[in-house]
Image (cartoon, rainbow, N blue to C red):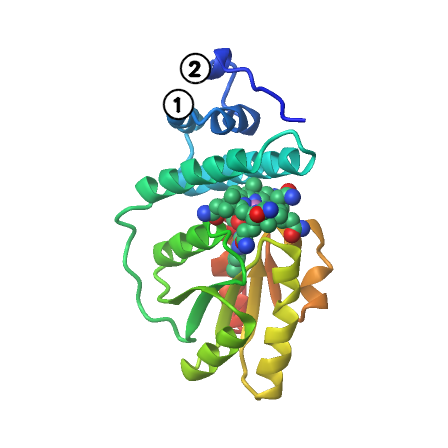
Amino acid sequence: MIVSYPTGHLSDVSAGPSADLLELALVNMDRLALQRIYSASGLTPLFFCEQFITPALAGIGEKWDRGELSLSHVYMSGRLCEDFMEQSFRGAPSSRASEDRVALAVLEDYHLLGKRLVGFVLRGGGVEYLDYGTVTAAELVQRVQDDSVRVLLISALMLPSALKVREVRDKLDQAGVPCRIIVGGAPFRLDPSLCDEVGADFCCASASQVLLALKLASGGEP
Ligand code: B12
């Protein structure tokens, strides 16, 4: 059953901005309302993405799962958020080389917004990284070896993709590659035991945790 969403009160953020209001704005493809909610939140673009966009999209995903929204709602909501990030993160600071070679990838998955946020945090923290985009487990193992990567950041939004981290871990271990793996994405947030199950070293609930995780992965104090 596809429900129709009310639109009337979208222009009114006087009751306070919220992820629920943003969810309505996204489902109604109302870019202006998105901007108004962002302005009223008083947050930086990164914290707005983490505190408003991530829960609003998760709510949309759940409604799609229950048959209350169509896949085109999910797709268009994702597009609006992607455009918001594109504008907000333009001209982000450039990075410098880190002690350990770092790479960032999405594993067999086309959910790219989480990776985009992680990349933004890395650049903001001055960390240089290799962006592998979307790759298969076999490609990822090969590239990590070729580039001598020592910390691998993986974003996975679908459970089958998240489970593929196990394959990456096992192949890297078999090849004797000393690489730490840091994971993030909805399946890891929903099931904290998944991190150990797939052999990852650290799991992050949000992009802003990545700098701390990198420090821990490199053997530094938190
Ligand atoms: C938007 C969306 C889409 C968009 C993606 C657009 C894009 N350009 O990325 C589109 C429409 C393309 C899409 C397609 C599909 N989707 Co979809 N999608 C979503 C949705 C609603 C939001 C995802 C999102 O972008 N969130 C916002 C970002 C910012 O959040 P995030 O990625 O979680 O990242 C945060 C943290 O997790 C963390 N993080 C993430 N990665 C990493 C990595 C590191 C290293 C660190 C430190 C942190 C970190 O940082 C971010 C916050 O700071 C989710 C619902 C959900 N619960 O997430 C479903 C969801 C992921 N999709 C789902 C499905 C099933 C699909 C499709 C198979 C649907 C279909 N039948 O075709 C396809 C598959 C596409 C593919 N092969 O990859 C399911 C997966 C279910 C499962 N158990 O596997 C979900 C969970 C929907 C649901 N059922 O609730 N989808």
Q: Are marks 1 and 2 in contact (CB under 8 Å)?
A: yes
Measured Cα–Cα span from mark 1 to mark 2: 8 Å
Image quadrant for the N terminus?
Answer: top right
Is 145 rendered above or below residue 23?
below
Left-right relation of 191 to 9:
right
Q: Residue 214: x, y in percent?
A: 50, 65
Residue type (three-letter) at the residue carrying disc 1: Arg
Q: Which residue is depicted at the point 33% across and 40% down?
A: 88
Badge 1 density bin: few <14, some 14–19, many ≥20, Cα 10 Å: some
Q: How many marks?
A: 2
Q: Is mark 1 within 8 Å of ligand 1?
A: no
Asked which secondary structure carries label 2, the reply is helix
Is 176 rendered above or below residue 154?
below
Left-right relation of 131 to 70:
left
Residue type (three-letter) at the residue carrying disc 2: Ser
Q: Which residue is depicted at the point 61% across and 83% down?
A: 173
Q: Residue 174: x, y in percent?
A: 62, 87
Is 44 rendered above or below residue 23?
below
Can you identify the residue that label 2 sits on?
11
Left-right relation of 41 to 188:
left
Q: Quadrant of residue 71?
A: top right
Between 211 and 32, the residue placed more toward the observer is 32
Can you identify the residue that label 1 sits on?
36
Asked whether residue 124 appears in the rendered view, the answer is yes
